[in-house]
Image: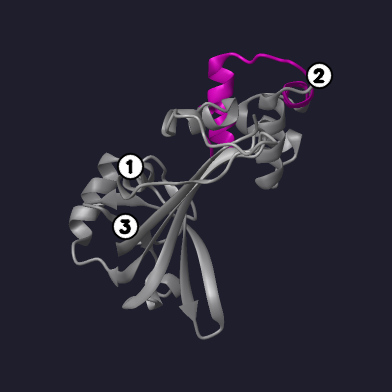
Amino acid sequence: MTTDLGRRLAARRTAAGMSREELGERCGADAHYIASLEEHAALPAIGTLVRVADALGTTVDDLAGTGSDRDGDRRPAARAPDGTAHPVVLEEEECRRLLGVRGIGRVAVFTSEGPAVHPVNYLVVEGDVAFRTAADTVLARAAGTEAAFEVERIDDVSAKGWSVLAVGLLQAASDPEELDGRAAAAHYEPWAGGTRTHWMRLAPVRLTGRRVVGRA
């Protein structure tokens, strides 16, 4: 019997482009054990779950399905007569809070070839979204233009989640040394690797968000 944990694990592994063998090698397990977690009601030790989540670049909360509730408003969502949930518009204060609970988001900019969207590791600094890139990237060249930043948490198994969208002016950061210090304190490191020393900041002038609380 497949559990919600197993479905989330399989979905995250597939999205990461890993086979069961590759995931097993990264977290110190074998492919048969990964298959057991995905396909049966196996209950892994917390240490194993931590290693699996780390190998997938996610968290135990995400795999266990507790993250959405922990981040969210526990008030019941408005529901239609058929039991489906209506999206709830989030207040700006809640958007700012949720912006600070994640570390991965997407930056959307306009280029000469059309819109471009790039995932980034980010920090929230005095209400701004700050991230590091290389000096010759699309994002660095977009300095001085309007950009959008989106962060979300989605549980595709239980059909619940939230998203926050920030729109504002994207600029090269004027305080890179301060940001380096904040990044070190937060153990922030861009997943993409390489030389990424060029800090960018997006100061939101419009902040909106929505939440869906899943099926009844």
- Give 192 or 169, whichever is nearer the viewer: 169
Point out the tag, 1 or 3, that comes first from the N-terminus: 1
The residue under label 1 is: 97
The residue depicted at 76 percent of the width and 28 percent of the height is 31
Q: Is residue 9 magenta?
A: no
The amino acid at mark 3 is Ala
Real-space Cα separation, disc 1 to disc 3, in angstroms: 16 Å
Q: Residues within 10 Å of mark 3 (few under 14, many from 20)?
A: many
- Give 27 or 70, whichever is nearer the viewer: 70
Q: Quadrant of the N terminus?
A: top right
Q: Secondary structure at mark 3?
A: strand
Report the disc number at residue 1. 2
Q: Residue 59 in the image: x percent, y percent? A: 51, 32
Q: Secondary structure at mark 1?
A: helix
Q: Secondary structure at mark 2?
A: loop
The residue under label 3 is: 130
Give the overall secondary structure of the magenta segment: helix
| The image quarter in which residue 84 lies | top right
| The image quarter in which residue 185 lies | top left
